[in-house]
Amino acid sequence: MGLNYWLLVLTFLSVNLDFFFMLIFLLKKYRVRQVVVGYLLGNIILLTASFFIGKTLALFLPEWLLGVLGFLPIWMALRNDDDDDADRTSSSPVLSVLVTYLSVCAGCNLSIFLPVLAGETMLHFLMTLGLVGVLTVAVVIVIKLIADVPVVERGMAAHGERLMKVCYVLIGLYVFWDSGLISHLMTLI
């Protein structure tokens, strides 16, 4: 598989969409730099875990079979549980942001990024880390700029959950196709 920037951007945005609400609150409580560092550390930890778990699975399974992992994002879209948005506190603002991010987004990130990163090379993974790093900083800055706009808050509250679920399903379907799972199953018919 090659690096697909659009898929990575869509994946990043969809798995973090629910956290964007938390960012609004965190940015009201902490400085932008503290939020960026905590959020970036959380992304690095979860992407690295997803990549290495995917690589371990790839050692034992053919690439087309790894396409079954596409069911993870689809399952995430279809399950009906709400993330715990309770305020997390700690002595360090960076640690507080990191713990909040990991507690809100760990399951989603691992489930969604694992199938996306499973077939990537180390170089592509490092490029992914760079892209996600840029996206992380950009998202924090954009959210800081628009956090107080009432129409944004109402729009996310009204449609954010549905949009996130549609993105998850699209990512799962892409993983089915990109891994070769669909073409492999078509040869069996």
Image (cartoon, rainbow, N blue to C red):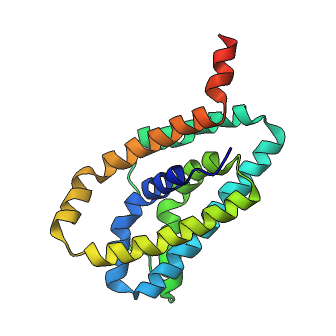
Quarter holding residue 52: bottom right
Pick out the residue farthest to the right: 59
Quarter holding residue 180: top right
Q: Is residue 29 visible?
A: yes
Q: Is residue 46 placed above or below 173 in the rendered structure?
A: below
Q: Position of residue 1 (x, y in %)?
A: 68, 44
Which is nearer the eye, 96 or 124?
124
In the rendered view of the protein, which quadrant contains the C terminus? top right
Q: Is residue 97 placed above or below 127 in the rendered structure?
A: below
Is 141 left or right of 53, judged from the image as shown?
A: left
Q: Position of residue 49 (x, y in %)?
A: 68, 60
Quarter holding residue 28: bottom left
Which is nearer the eye, 89 or 129?
129
Residue at x-position 42% and y-position 45%:
167
Q: Position of residue 132 (x, y in %)?
A: 55, 65
Q: Position of residue 15 (x, y in %)?
A: 47, 55
Is 171 left or right of 128, judged from the image as shown?
A: left
Q: Is residue 124 placed above or below 99 in the rendered structure?
A: above
Pick out the residue farthest to the left: 150
Q: Is residue 75 visible?
A: no
Residue at x-position 68% and y-position 59%:
125
Residue at x-position 43% and y-position 73%:
138
Q: How many marks?
A: 0
Residue at x-position 49% and y-position 38%:
74
